[in-house]
Image: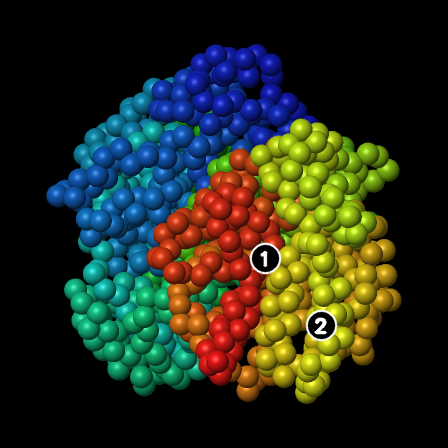
Amino acid sequence: MASGTAQRGSSASTAPAALVRDLRAAVRGEVASDAAARALTTMDASNYRRVPLTVIAPHDDADITAALAVCRAHGVPVVPRGGGTSIAGQATGTGVVLDLTRHLRSVLALDPASRTAVVQPGLVLDDLRAAAAPHGLTFGPDPSTHSRCTLGGMIGNNSCGSHSVAWGTTADNVHALTVARYGGDTLRLEPGAPGPPGVRDLVAGHLALLRTGFPALPRRISGYALDALLPENGPDPVRAFCGSEGTLGVITEATVRLVEAPAARALAVLGYADESAAADAAPGLLPYHPLTVEGMAADLVREPAGLPRGAAWLFAETGGATPAEARAHAERMVRAASADAVDTAVVTDPAGQRALWRIREDAAGTATRMPDGGGTSRGSAAGRGGEAWPGWEDCAVPPARLGGYLRDFRALLAQHGLRGTPYGHFGDGCIHVRIDFDLLTGDGVARFRRFSEDLAALVVAHGGSLSGEHGDGQARAELLPKMYGDELVALFTRYKDLWDPEGAMNPGILARPARLDENLRFDVLPREPVDVAFGYPHDGGDFSAAVRRCVGVAKCRTEKVAGPSVMCPSFRATGEEAHSTRGRARLLHEMLAGDAGGLITDGWRSTEVRDALDLCLSCKGCRSDCPVGVDMATYKAEFLHHHYRGRPRPASHYALGRLPLWLRLAAPLAGPLNALARARPLVALAKRLAGIAPERGIPPLARETFTRWLDRHRGAGTLSGEGPALLWPDTFTEYLTPEVGRAAVTVLEAAGREVVPAGRGLCCGLTYVSTGQLDRARGVMRRTLDRLGGAPGDPVVVLEPSCAATLRTDLPELLPDDPRAARLAASVHTLAQYLEAYAPGWEPPRLDRPVTGQTHCHQHAVLGDAAERRLRERAGLTGELAGGCCGLAGNFGYERGHWDVSVACAEDQLLPAVRDAAPGTAILADGFSCRTQLAQLVGVRGRHLAELLAEGLEEGLEEGAPQG
């Protein structure tokens, strides 16, 4: 059974004051031993959890050596940590964690002539690739986490990625290393160098064992690569160090090899009947020298757009000096595969290739939820249905044996009553899979152990490696004797002791490993559902299951996003783990653990969780961009609801959270209030009392509300439409920007519809939800449902994306027992969605001009913008909108203390796109927050799509009017 007892006991300990004092005296970087800092590093992307004493962010290599000397003096273990995306538990530790990502992230030198680069360990792989790209070079290994994994972590795990069939593993691409050992002394490792004292004698005394004990296959990552130290192999201590998982020393500097990047690429996509058929076909593509041979099955594909027919696919990328050469190479592979493939396609368009690769790269997260939402038949713990986990994530066998191995693997899953969907590097015989282990109960954990032991035997029977990419960590190291035998594993331990006599570098990993069912991160979580306000329909109503969605692959830590992606704007603004979706999920995990976890023990009253969530913009970007659909905006609202229950809230919650109430009361006094708003001392005082940022401007109230104008307009009786269109009078359109509503009426009437308000006194509850006033939100929502006009289920046009998203998601999730909520949610349409569905024959005016701006983050995350894209195209509006978040994000950008982050988010994508726009470009921003941010930061007027269309209609009428 899982040994949660030891974990619970160790997690309660805190760093000795003397250790913290000595570390702070010795290093220039940050030293943090508070509960939040420790909680953020308890887990990586694995099933494991180990609680550190202290987290250090070394400023330079001198800090690393100084910290190692202090740790040795205090007898405290050390674990180096990069992006924290390791899947076997090796990036967690019980002593001092060295966070190498904050400062040690530079390319120190890059020599195009020798095709080498000197890098620091915390450098993100994509940053190295960006530095090498102008020289036509790249770093060959490319894990799916390339946008956030670090070179130090890649070296520690001997990472590979999809291009290993062409460029090998990380070990194949590292020339030299500078390594700091426990205690602070450093070694320079280069081919032919001896390494630590005693290593040469160790090798000389066991030549026969080292020459015969390692299987020959491209993805042998398990154990220490001691065969690299044989005389005929160099010896090569660099290769032997790669894959040591932080158990030997800390990399302070690495010299890596670069490869020539093809000028053009094409992608041959080959469809097969199932993944075994795809696996059987993969070795036949290798003689054509592809850059990749990746495989995946239909279970992992959310949207099959762009894929040929089939139930499994191979992605074979080709390169060439020209697009024609790359395409010809791909077509040769298609012809070679045509006898076995169900269907094929060659994709040369870069955007199309990126879209397909995105499916593959998201698989590590997508596979964590079974596509049908169902779990195995055993057990019925709330919320567990459909969850799948790593642990046997990346076994590898000789490529020629992959098809047979997969068939045996499927049979083994069935024997144990488990499910999983294989995918991965078929050309190298390496398979990734998430399996629906029950890791919450004693019986389930016992089954996990039995399966692990049986699978290890199966892999070995096929001549394979327990790890083919992600390392052994805690997940597999215990089973290394099955692969290597006791004698060679004992040699691993002796090698470790020559490097680290005290055994303090990442103990419990590789040598003298912890058991694979110890330290499971689920041990500390409550077994009964937590009482919550939202329904969490995709997690069985269980908040713990919702938090468990975060598996740690850290896509939210991507620092540069392309296209429409949003997640995670606050992390990009601050660079702090606590402000990433993963960081916040980790803190919520520790909050749920409570006393059992020993870190955050005050539950919903936790200040650590509150402070981390404070900079969450509630943009909902993670709901769509996170591969497993973590919805931090909902979790934040839930937390704030409990955190402030029965006690005073921040002033901004009363001022901004109840904005619809104040605007309704203020509307009759719009003129006088607008005049008072020009009195600066009075406004400054009002902002201070309301908790509003002093830098933020207050938008003026509309002199006439939208619904009052609509009543007058309808009273004129000028239109006889084909039928009524229900238009939602959201708070922002009603009281602040009625011109948007008037423009929408113009457009809908032009499409032959008579516009009527969906109801009177309606409110979606957005501002109450975003500030966690969920009891009030439910009351507002129920009143809205009572007042709603029209028949149940009639389509409703909602102009404000944030209000539409609230009605689509928050409304039914807060009122799951009210059928009216679900009906209204299903009836919500944006303007473009409504026109496409109910006025398909209407032709918009031809505007024929470029546009820029930003897709509203809630539109991207919840509503989708496909209809808007098609409408813009029909209207002749050209250009792509930026992703990210504007940074105002409803109440967020107005609250005191958020100004700097709000501006930084706007500067991420929106403001550069606007500044770079050519003269005459229309600035499109459907959200009130986006338009307000543009007006207040750069003095630019953004317009709703309805406004652009209405202007085009009016211009057309003027041009067609008779001349007097």
Q: Which is nearer the N-term, disc 2 or disc 1? A: 2
Residue 713 - label = 2
Q: Of the residues shown, which amino acid type is indicated by label 1?
A: Gly
Count the numbered circles shown.
Answer: 2
* Residue position for label 1: 927
Q: Quadrant of residue 608?
A: top right
**Can residue 369 be spotted in the picture?**
no
Q: For the residue carrying disc 2, how many other residues have a C-alpha within 10 Å: few (<14), some (14-19), or many (20+)?
A: some
Q: Position of residue 700 (x, y in %)?
A: 65, 47
Instruction: From the image, state whether disc 2 or disc 1 is nearer to you.
Output: 2
Nearer to me, 764 or 175: 764
Foreground: 538 or 784? Answer: 784
- In the figure, residue 525 lies in which quadrant? top right
Q: Is residue 883 left or right of residue 787?
A: left
> 207 left or right of 805?
left
Residue 450 lies left or right of residue 675; in this view the side is left
Q: Which mark is residue 840?
A: none
Task: Please name the residue shown 51% across and 13% down the image.
Answer: 22
Q: Residue at 23% across / 78% down in the picture?
A: 332
- Asked if residue 396 lies left or right of residue 943, the reply is left
Q: CA distance from mark 2 to mark 1?
A: 24 Å
The residue lying at 37 percent from left, 35 percent from top is: 105
Is disc 2 placed on a helix, strand or loop?
helix
Mark 1 is surrounded, within 10 Å at the Cα level, by few (under 14), some (14 to 19) or many (20 or more) other residues, namely: many
